[in-house]
């Protein structure tokens, strides 16, 4: 698909990933900005079907990034809201797109949809081999329904819908809010506050033993765009970097980059979350040529630099 000639709706287009994706569409793919629609939540609440219908009217491609998400804390505090909001947004925007005759629907799900004890690296065929990790299962399952709906709509309506499963993203522009941020921005903020306040220790949830994989936001945006252009099959596709990092090593790396010499205290009364996470991303490379090239340390340095130059914190 030639995106330069398409009218594109990007839900969540003003968020962390969405803003980067639109920037790449305009600068790298030369898509005219006037061809891109990115309504704000305050103007277009996708939990309301009439808003979904209005947003998809006259659109050729929908890239559905909108999500209500956060770290373990938010998932434990508001599992019902996270389930309902994500499920209803995805279900309704895809149905509205189908009714509007949209040519392609790109659904972006989450690695949280995978079973808790998936063999590493996670392969797409493992998606249905168990229940997700309990702390984020409601969110993960709600986003996983994008795949079910996409495959059902392809079967019944010949609707061209694809589903992507990216790992945790990070990078400049991430969400650094204390109550809702994911692990990397939360740790960067924690270290920055400790340095500012002269504290000689930081406290981190869990044991530090779980592993995670992280994908630089610039590369995640590129992977989604490549799939939008080149992938038209029903099978789900992972987007990842191929690097597995323990939370303990992540904390040590952030402390080193930020030149923080304090002690790290592990609060083992708090949950670790899923034991291990790393994706097999060979399908993405084979099907549409996506491969991560940004080293994790380089991406972290860029993220920390942006934070230190941009964010005011207490």
Image: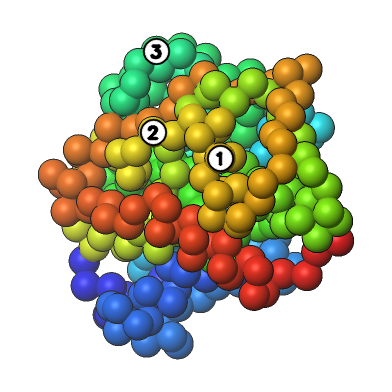
* Residue that appears at 37% across and 81% down: 26
Q: Looking at the image, can residue 123 be seen?
A: yes
Residue 129 has which mark?
3
Q: CA distance from mark 1 to mark 3?
A: 33 Å
- Name the residue carrying label 1: 252
Classify residue 84 by image quadrant: top right
Element marked by disc 2: loop
Q: CA distance from mark 2 to mark 1?
A: 15 Å
Could you say which is closer to the camera, residue 156 or residue 272? Answer: 272
Q: Position of residue 20 (x, y in %)?
A: 47, 69
Element marked by disc 3: loop
Q: Position of residue 159 (x, y in %)?
A: 32, 48
Q: Position of residue 4 (x, y in %)?
A: 28, 80
Q: Earlier in the sequence, mark 3 or mark 2?
A: 3
Q: Earlier in the sequence, mark 1 or mark 3?
A: 3
Could you say which is closer to the camera, residue 290 or residue 172? Answer: 172
- Name the residue carrying label 2: 244
Give the mark toward the camera: 1 or 3.
Answer: 1
Q: Earlier in the sequence, mark 2 or mark 1?
A: 2
Q: Residues within 10 Å of mark 2 (few under 14, many from 20)?
A: some
User: Does 21 sit left or right of 70 as displayed?
Assistant: left
């Amino acid at each position: 698909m030639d995106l330069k000639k398409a009218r594109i709706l990007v839900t969540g287009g003003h968020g962390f990933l969405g803003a980067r994706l639109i920037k790449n569409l305009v600068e790298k793919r030369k898509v005219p900005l006037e061809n891109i629609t990115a309504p704000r939540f305050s103007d277009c609440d996708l939990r309301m079907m009439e808003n979904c219908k209005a947003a998809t009217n006259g659109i050729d491609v929908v890239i559905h990034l909108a999500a209500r998400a956060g770290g373990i804390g938010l998932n434990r505090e508001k599992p019902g809201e996270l389930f309902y909001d994500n499920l209803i947004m995805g279900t309704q925007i895809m149905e509205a797109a189908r009714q509007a005759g949209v040519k392609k629907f790109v659904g972006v799900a989450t690695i949280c949809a995978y079973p808790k004890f998936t063999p590493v690296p996670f392969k797409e065929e493992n998606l249905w081999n168990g229940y997700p990790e309990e702390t984020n299962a409601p969110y993960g399952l709600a986003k996983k329904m994008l795949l079910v709906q996409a495959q059902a709509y392809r079967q019944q309506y010949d609707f061209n819908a694809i589903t992507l499963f990216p790992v945790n993203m990070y990078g400049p522009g991430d969400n650094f809010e204390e109550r809702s941020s994911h692990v990397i921005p939360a740790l960067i903020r924690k270290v920055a506050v400790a340095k500012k306040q002269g504290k000689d220790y930081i406290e981190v949830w869990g044991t530090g033993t779980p592993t995670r994989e992280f994908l630089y936001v610039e590369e995640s945006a590129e992977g989604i765009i490549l799939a939008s252009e080149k992938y038209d099959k029903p099978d789900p596709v992972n987007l990842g970097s191929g690097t597995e990092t323990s939370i303990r090593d992540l904390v040590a790396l952030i402390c080193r980059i930020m030149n923080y010499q304090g002690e790290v205290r592990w609060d083992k009364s708090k949950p670790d979350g899923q034991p291990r996470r790393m994706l097999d991303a060979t399908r993405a490379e084979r099907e549409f040529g996506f491969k991560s090239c940004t080293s994790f340390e380089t991406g972290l340095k860029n993220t920390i630099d942006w934070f230190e130059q941009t964010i005011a914190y207490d």
